[in-house]
């Protein structure tokens, strides 16, 4: 098992937007487009003045100064302001290893935290607002460091059981990525983390929303897509490098998950470089 410091280096932090904003009664979910209510990234609110309300997970949270609030990805939420609310807000993701799985979408934490030093967090947000749109390497690195500081209170609220599960899933994802071209069985993966295969299978499916072996197939297909741009590799070679022993199996599973044969998908990805894979769909977002 890896140390927490090593594990934290494998988290991928991504900032979508951060702002300082003054809101009024117009800040109400009833006024938002539907797609703005359930979104694929975390929302973090730090009120400075005034009052607002966020209702999610069957609880009402009063947004008040001195606290910081988290709303996980894909969470149905109702937001409102009865007068005036001045706040910093941040949209972000924290992906586990090289997956598209956000840590806060699969592991529970507290969604309202009292800040011992709100001035320190205000400084973090102020700095992040200034630099997050810069494209230079130093600013991008600093932005991720600032985000890491801001979300620490929520990571700390994950209990020991949650942390243990997190490390287990990390070890599984890490092993899959490093051995994508090799046979991956439930029995072998269970041995890696020292768990009963049935327990591991149930735990993974419950936390990740997908079965372990289906996830392996998804990652193999995603890996294959990444190799499609290499014109020197034949489809049979790509299949082997992605862990498919037989080309027929590769073609069958690839078409089942993407709707296209590997050959047709390769033509499409070469013609449209921004195309990416998600389970059963095509879109322009990263997998």
Image (spheres, rainbow, N blue to C red):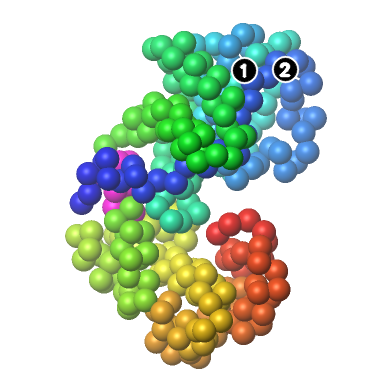
Compare marks 2 and 1 and give the one earlier in the sequence.
Answer: 2
Judge the density around disc 1: few (<14), some (14-19), many (≥20) Cα neighbours within 10 Å: many
- From the top left corner, tell me how far across and down residue 157 is, in percent: 36, 29
Task: Check contact, mark 2 vs mark 1: CB within 8 A.
Answer: yes
Name the residue tied to disc 1. 87
Relative to residue 286, is residue 151 drawn left or right? left
Judge the density around disc 2: few (<14), some (14-19), many (≥20) Cα neighbours within 10 Å: some
**For residue 23, which numbered disc appears in the image?**
2
In 3D space, how far apart are the residues under numbered discs 2 and 1 (Cα atoms)? 8 Å
Q: Residue at x 46, y 32 (%)?
A: 142
Report if residue 218 lies within the magenta region: no
- From the top left corner, tell me how far across and down residue 34 is, in percent: 75, 41
> What element does badge 1 sit on?
strand
Q: Residue at x 32, y 70 (%)?
A: 179
Q: Which residues are magenta?
A: 162-169
Q: Residue at x 56, y 81 (%)?
A: 231
Report if residue 164 lies within the magenta region: yes
Query: If the image is split into quadrants, where does the C terminus sit?
Result: bottom right
> What element does badge 2 sit on?
strand
Magenta stretch: helix, strand or loop mostly: helix
Relative to residue 209, is residue 268 drawn left or right? right
Above/below status of 103 relative to 236:
above
Q: Compare residues 121 and 73 and report the one nearer the observer.
A: 121
């Amino acid at each position: 098992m890896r140390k927490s410091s090593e594990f934290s280096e494998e988290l991928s932090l991504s900032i979508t937007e951060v702002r300082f904003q003054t809101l009024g009664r117009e800040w109400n979910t009833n006024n938002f487009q539907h797609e703005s209510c359930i979104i694929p990234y975390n929302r973090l609110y730090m009120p400075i003045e005034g009052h607002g309300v966020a209702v999610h997970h069957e609880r009402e949270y009063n947004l008040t100064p001195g606290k910081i609030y988290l709303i996980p990805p894909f969470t149905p939420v109702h937001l409102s302001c009865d007068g005036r609310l001045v706040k910093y807000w941040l949209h972000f993701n924290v992906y586990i290893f090289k997956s598209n799985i956000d840590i806060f979408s699969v592991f529970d934490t507290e969604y309202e935290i009292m800040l011992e030093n709100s001035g320190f967090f205000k400084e973090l947000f102020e700095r992040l607002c200034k630099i997050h749109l810069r494209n230079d390497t130093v600013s991008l690195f600093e932005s991720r460091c600032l985000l890491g500081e801001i979300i620490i209170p929520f990571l700390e609220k994950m209990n020991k059981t949650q942390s243990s599960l997190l490390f287990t899933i990390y070890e599984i994802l890490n092993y899959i990525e490093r051995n994508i071209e090799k046979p991956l069985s439930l029995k072998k993966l269970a041995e890696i983390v020292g768990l009963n295969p049935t327990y591991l299978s149930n735990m993974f499916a419950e936390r990740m929303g997908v079965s372990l072996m289906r996830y392996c197939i998804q990652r193999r297909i995603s890996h294959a897509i990444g190799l499609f741009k290499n014109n020197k590799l034949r489809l049979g070679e790509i299949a082997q490098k992605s862990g498919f022993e037989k080309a027929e199996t590769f073609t069958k599973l690839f078409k089942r998950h993407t709707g296209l044969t590997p050959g047709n998908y390769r033509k499409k990805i070469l013609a449209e470089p921004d195309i990416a894979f998600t389970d059963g769909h095509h879109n322009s977002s990263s997998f």
